Amino acid sequence: MGGFFGVVSDRDCTQEVFYGTDYHSHLGTMRGGMAIKGRNGIHRVIHDITGAQFRSKFEDELSSMEGNTGIGVISDYEDQPLIIGSHLGRYAIVTVGFINNIQEIVRSVFSSRSGHFTEMTGGEVNPTEVVAMLIDQEDSFAAGIDRAQDMIEGSCSALLLTDEGIYAARDRLGRTPVAVGRREGAMAVTLETCAFPNLDYVLERELGPGEVVLLTRDGASTVRKPGDRMRICSFLWVYYGFPASSYEGINVEDTRNRCGACLARRDNVEVDMIAGVPDSGTGHAVGYANESGIPFRRPFVKYTPTWPRSFMPRDQSTRDLVARMKLIPIREMIQDRRLLFCEDSIVRGTQLKDTVRRLFDSGASEIHMRPACPPLVFGCRYLNFSRSRSEMELAGRRAIAELEGDAREVPAQYLDPNSQQYSDMVDRIRQRLGLTTLSYQRLDDLVEAIGLPGDRLCTYCFDGRE
């Protein structure tokens, strides 16, 4: 998915940009970058972080960077920030989102013979460069951002580091959050609000959907007013978001506790302990345990000092290996026990199947799984979630294909938790994973746990609703 952080300050902001960006490391594993604007222009650094932490790649270079304005980014896909020279001036840009119609935009540029793009590995075009090109076709940054938002199908939130300050733009339907913070003599902008407290920033406000502001050290002035319609990603609270962050004023960890409680209220299984698949399943498990009165335990622990996240590596064997090496079972807590695990979601189930097998090998008598969201049936069209995965590989979609013989279309009954088809789909997933029982969160319970009206949330991956 990716995340960004920016600062406009009355003093050198390099350290703040560095640490603020680092608080987004859970959102991407491919590239990390910073751009600092000082007396000698913009100094940019980009590093590959696929096998290392963001901090370890940048610490030695911080002494060479100095300036009062800066932006940083963690990206799960492309090199960022980009430095752009155009008639609007020289600026740096970072983006978060997904452009569904990128090829259409590129063809329109080529047909007018008005531009060119640098190819990335694999021959793809850098999406951030496409956004910059759209911005540069207008007479001002504000008009350019507006043009880009109008042309992009999908989502795009962005930071632009310019001579005027930092332009911060939230995507048109607010699928990703963007928040502004203040301390004396400085303003900051972030995707994750957990980046603010330890840097002494106080959350001032969140941008509305489609809103654009210009940050200077004096404040944030609105360049484009927010729209009325919002479809913020519900998966932020389920999985992506950091527990200490809040979006639309709703804390992630609190929401996960409520998700777990919802699961417990609909359950009657008899087990010896509740556990979470670390780390994102833990908050859901705590909520389940508190609601049910069944003790919370940690029969499975995660070794993180040297192992990077396993979510994004494109090679399946690498993902599986990293996931196996990180998760360590505690046989003494598993032997002859009935375990109920809460998990954020089941994407394909490849790693989960191995985890279940290892738990049984460690002596578990029963293993029950309770994902905190409904079955994933539709591939995300708006963020970078599961970019490299075919929609047909999703656990829910694959089960439908096995039951129907074809899953190019999804019969509505498979989306109804009260239908026999839905039960058959879940049982097919349960069998494949080797679980004793499997029960998913209902969509209405997830919406209730988050606390926003359903029409303000994006639930496309669960119900296909645009």
Image (cartoon, rainbow, N blue to C red):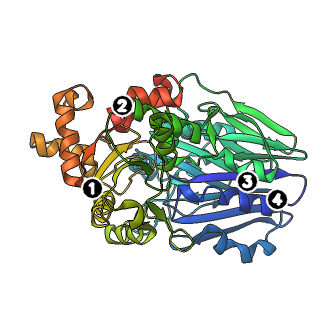
- Secondary element type, mark 1: loop
Pick whichever of labels 2 and 4 is earlier in the sequence. 4
Neighbour class for label 4 at 10 Å: few (<14), some, many (≥20)?
Answer: many
Q: Nearer the viewer, mark 1 or mark 3?
A: 1
Residue at horizontal 38%, vertical 52%?
Answer: 386
Pick whichever of labels 2 and 1 is earlier in the sequence. 1
The residue closer to the viewer here, 72 or 341, is: 341
Q: Which amino acid does label 4 sit on?
A: Cys
Neighbour class for label 3 at 10 Å: few (<14), some, many (≥20)?
Answer: few
Residue behind mark 2? 442
Residue behind mark 1? 365
Q: Which of marks 2 and 4 is in front?
A: 2
As drawn, is 271 to the left or to the right of 435?
right
What is the x, y in percent for residue 418?
Answer: 24, 25
Pick whichever of labels 1 and 4 is earlier in the sequence. 4
Circles 4 and 3: CB atoms closer than 8 Å: no
Q: In which quarter of the image is residue 421?
A: top left
Residue at horizontal 25%, vertical 52%?
Answer: 393
- Cα distance, mark 2 to mark 1? 27 Å
Look at the image and tell me whether residue 410 can be seen.
Answer: no
